[in-house]
Amino acid sequence: MKNIQVVDGAVNCGFPIYATTNDEFRMIFPGLDQDLEIVEDFIARVGEDRADAILGAIWDRRIDKKSALGIHGTLFYEKEEKRACFPASRREADWQAHTKASLANGS
C-alpha cells in the first residue's frame, strides 16, 4: 500500500491522505518515480469510468494523518492553472529546480 495526499481548490480543503494499492498508485502515477499528478491528466489517460472506479475505491481508505507512514504521491484537483509549475517528470524532487528555472525565464 502507498499513501497519496489530495490537494483541491476548496477553501475548506483538509488535504486528506488515502491508502492506495500498488496497482492503483501506478495507474495514477505511471511515470518513473512519478509522485505528482493532476487529476484531469489521470482521467484523460485512463478514461472517466476507470478513474471513477479507482478513485471510488481509494475514497474508502482515508488515513488519519497522525498514523500515516509517509506520503508517496500528491494528486491535485482544480489546479489546471498550476500546470506550468509542474516539472515534466512529475517528480516532487525536480520541483525546486523547475520552479527556479521558470522564475529565471520570467514564467
Image: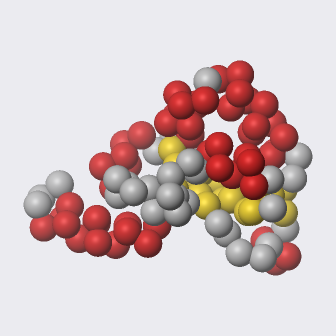
10 relative to 106 in the view: left or right: right
Question: Relative to 18, is 64 above or below?
Answer: below
| Rendering coords of residue 97 (x, y %) | 29, 72
6 relative to 17 in the view: left or right: left
| Rendering coords of residue 73 (x, y %) | 61, 61
- Residue drawn where x is 34% and y is 72% of the image: 96
Q: Which residue lies furthest to the right in this view?
A: 60
Q: In which quarter of the image is the C terminus?
A: bottom left
Question: Relative to 2, is 76 above or below?
Answer: above
Viewer-side residue, 13 vs 105 = 105
- Residue drawn where x is 74% and y is 39% of the image: 55
| Rendering coords of residue 46 (x, y %) | 61, 29
Viewer-side residue, 70 vs 81 = 70
Whether residue 15 is visible:
no
- Residue drawn where x is 39% and y is 57% of the image: 89
Q: In which quarter of the image is the N terminus?
A: bottom right
Question: Relative to 26, is 33 above or below?
Answer: below
- Residue drawn where x is 71% and y is 22% of the image: 49
36 relative to 64 in the view: left or right: left
57 relative to 54 in the view: left or right: right
Please identify the quarter of the rendering in which residue 20 is found.
bottom right
Whether residue 105 is visible:
yes
Question: Relative to 71, is 107 above or below?
Answer: above
| Rendering coords of residue 57 (x, y %) | 84, 40
Q: Residue furthest front?
A: 32
